[in-house]
Image: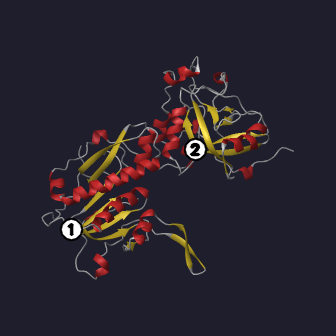
């Protein structure tokens, strides 16, 4: 059943040039879209004559009569750099917020169109109707796939090879449920981190937005409703989603999570050194290629999470479920400074009796429990078989992308300061 869209009739007869745009956004994706719009505004033949920006309020404190920011959105930084007027709605809800007049009322008239990209707040019908040409939204997925706040991360976790950007009418009641004005596919590079996708898809989204607003009447006349039978959703992720669960994750799963949260929330796991449990962050890692033999030829005799190293080898090798391996090259242990593989091995691994990482903190007054393989798991006969191991069909990342970890696979994040040492 098709959902109703906003029924207000917007003006589309006026020429596209000379548009007055109010841009709504917050994060890096919105920053890349705004860069394209601002580039058009300052070009020799612009579509956009005047533009202002709406973004979340910055958080700062005063130090020696200067603002020291604890949070400032990328969109606000870019807007201030380009001397664009910035509006910061104070309330978390936009229900009482009023659309400003152009240039603070110095110029008569309303904004022509509102453009939204990763704004993070729901905009009601009253605000949509405050623009003579309505509002459009730039969404980084091929809607109706992956509605919601994290479509790029979800596409990586799902192992998708193609994503894309959608320009849609802003729906007054359903998030990401508006009519589709334009879509552009984006092939996902198999090794690319989320930051690269945000940069490239945001740029693509900005370019597609300019094409849509150049002939908005044509785009609306040829718009289509979303197929509600194909709707999927993304969700907000948090720190728990970047923890490695050795009992469930293959090397490919681990690398996908690394790509999805790269430079935002590093992959992390636990290691036990004597009577201490320490968190280890993997800042840089890759899946070991089949052409490189394992550092230990008997690697399949060791449980997932086992650590191997060799003199003058610039990585630490860790075994994974299904016989795969990851190569980690940058580490951070329990909030310490970053370490390369040689520093990590010298400072931690050589003094580490078990040399096996664990999924969750344990009671250090007891022995580390043995590794428990999933029910029905079949170990590959050799490490080369692990690259075509049909016995491992866990689909961990698929479940991670669509729902929070269940309690039987969960864990409690604890601070090292709360641990008790043995006497």
Residue under circle 2? 284
- Provide residue 54's location: percent of width, then percent of height: 37, 68
Count of numbered marks = 2
In which quadrant of the rendered view does residue 31 lie?
Answer: bottom left
Residue 149 visible somewhere in the drawing? no
- State which tag comes first along the sequence, 1 or 2: 1
C-alpha gap between disc 1 and disc 2: 49 Å
Residue at far bottom of view: 106
Q: Residue at x 45, y 43 (%)?
A: 192
Mark carried by residue 246: none
- Provide residue 245's location: percent of width, then percent of height: 59, 36
Q: Residue at x 58, y 18 (%)?
A: 382
Foreground: disc 1 or disc 2: 2
In which quadrant of the rendered view does residue 398 lie?
Answer: top left
Residue 304 visible somewhere in the drawing? yes
Crowd class of label 1 (few under 14; some 14 to 19; many from 20; radius 10 Å): some
- Provide residue 265's location: percent of width, then percent of height: 55, 50
Seen in the image, is 1 located left or right of residue 315?
Answer: left
Q: Secondary structure at mark 1?
A: loop
Residue under circle 1? 132
Residue at far right of view: 423
């Amino acid at each position: 059943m098709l959902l109703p869209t906003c029924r207000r009739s917007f003006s589309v007869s006026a020429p596209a040039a000379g548009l007055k745009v109010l841009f709504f956004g917050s994060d890096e994706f919105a920053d890349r879209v705004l860069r394209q719009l601002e580039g058009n505004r300052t070009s020799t033949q612009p579509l956009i004559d005047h533009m202002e920006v709406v973004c979340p309020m910055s958080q700062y404190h005063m130090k020696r009569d200067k603002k020291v920011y604890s949070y400032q959105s990328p969109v606000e930084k870019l807007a201030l750099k380009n001397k664009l007027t910035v509006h910061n709605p104070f309330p978390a809800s936009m229900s009482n917020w009023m659309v400003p007049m152009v240039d603070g009322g110095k110029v008569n008239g309303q904004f022509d169109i509102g453009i939204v990209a990763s704004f993070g707040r729901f905009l009601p019908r009253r605000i949509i109707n405050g623009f003579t040409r309505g509002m459009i939204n730039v969404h980084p997925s091929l809607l109706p796939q992956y509605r919601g706040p994290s479509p790029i991360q979800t596409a990586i976790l799902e192992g998708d090879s193609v994503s894309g950007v959608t320009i849609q009418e802003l729906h007054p009641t359903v998030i990401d449920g508006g009519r589709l004005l334009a879509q552009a596919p984006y092939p996902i590079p198999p090794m690319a981190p989320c930051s690269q996708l945000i940069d490239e898809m945001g740029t693509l989204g900005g370019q597609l937005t300019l094409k849509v607003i150049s002939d908005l009447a044509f785009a609306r006349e040829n718009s289509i409703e979303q197929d509600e039978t194909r709707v999927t959703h993304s969700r907000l992720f948090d720190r728990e989603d970047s923890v490695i669960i050795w009992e469930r994750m293959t090397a490919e799963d681990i690398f996908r999570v690394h790509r999805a949260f790269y430079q935002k929330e590093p992959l992390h796991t636990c290691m036990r050194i004597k009577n201490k449990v320490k968190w280890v962050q993997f800042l840089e890692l890759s899946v070991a290629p089949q052409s490189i033999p394992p550092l230990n030829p008997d690697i399949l005799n060791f449980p997932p999470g086992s650590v191997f190293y060799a003199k003058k080898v610039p990585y630490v090798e860790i075994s994974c479920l299904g016989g795969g391996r990851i190569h980690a090259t940058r580490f951070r242990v329990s909030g310490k400074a970053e370490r390369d593989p040689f520093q990590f091995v010298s400072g931690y691994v050589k003094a580490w009796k078990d040399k096996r990482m664990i999924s969750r903190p344990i009671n250090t007054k007891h022995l580390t429990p043995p590794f428990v393989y999933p029910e029905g798991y079949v170990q590959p006969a050799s490490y080369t078989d692990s690259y075509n191991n049909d016995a491992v069909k866990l689909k961990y990342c698929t479940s991670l992308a669509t729902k929070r970890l269940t309690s039987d696979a969960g864990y409690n994040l604890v601070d090292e300061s709360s641990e008790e040492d043995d006497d």
